[in-house]
Amino acid sequence: MPVFDFRFTVDAPVDVVSAFHFEPGILKTLTPPLMIMQVHRFEPLADESINDFTMWMGPVPIRWKAMHSSVSTSGFTDTQVAGPMKFWTHTHSFAADGENSTEVHEYIEYEHAGGLRGLRSRLLFSRIGLLALFTMRKVITRREVRRRMARATAQF
């Protein structure tokens, strides 16, 4: 089974990075600029919470439904329960990498379906596609966490 393993650091304490990922609307925040995210159902992050959304990758709609598990301040897992892949489980982990630095670890085990469904997922969720998506999420995470920390500091 293919694996996608991606790590990056954010210049912020782990509790700040974790809290960022628990924000309502985070899915739209983390969506790259050229992709449109239509959220149908988004429950607060908790064990067995559901996200149901459509990602528009250009003119192509990708409907996705995921269930969360192992939710804690150090991370969570989302597993596709309906969508383009035959199998998809994505674990997000947050670990301190110093006093004011956090390592974000994105670990995905996945399998493409067969037939036309699999062809579409292979094109949209190839290794290079995943690398592009998560590189953008890295940039967005760093930028948005920095903005939130600056606003919090300015309030005091």
Image (spheres, grey):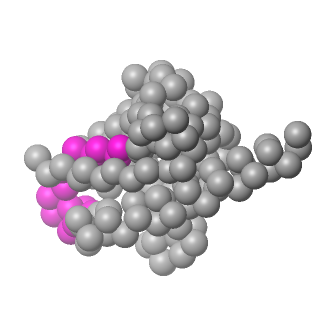
In the image, is residue 73 part of the stretch drawn in magenta? no
Q: Nearer the viewer, residue 109 or 118?
A: 109
Residue 34 sits above or below residue 113 on the image: below
x and y percent of residue 137 in the render? 48, 59
Q: Which residue: 35% across, 46% down?
A: 106
Residue 139 sits above or below residue 39 on the image: below
Residue 102 sits above or below residue 150 on the image: above
Q: Quadrant of residue 12?
A: top right
Q: Quadrant of residue 44?
A: top right
Q: Which residue: 47% across, 66% down?
A: 136
Quadrant in the picture for the C terminus: top right
x and y percent of residue 60 in the render? 44, 72
x and y percent of residue 21 in the render? 56, 40
In the image, is residue 118 part of the stretch drawn in magenta? yes
x and y percent of residue 34 in the render? 54, 75
Question: Is 130 left or right of 152, judged from the image as shown?
Answer: left
Q: Which residue: 61% across, 37% down?
A: 16
Q: Nearer the viewer, residue 17 or 60?
A: 17
Q: Nearer the viewer, residue 88 or 15?
A: 15
The residue segment tinted magenta is: 105-122
Query: Can I make out residue 137 in this image?
Result: yes
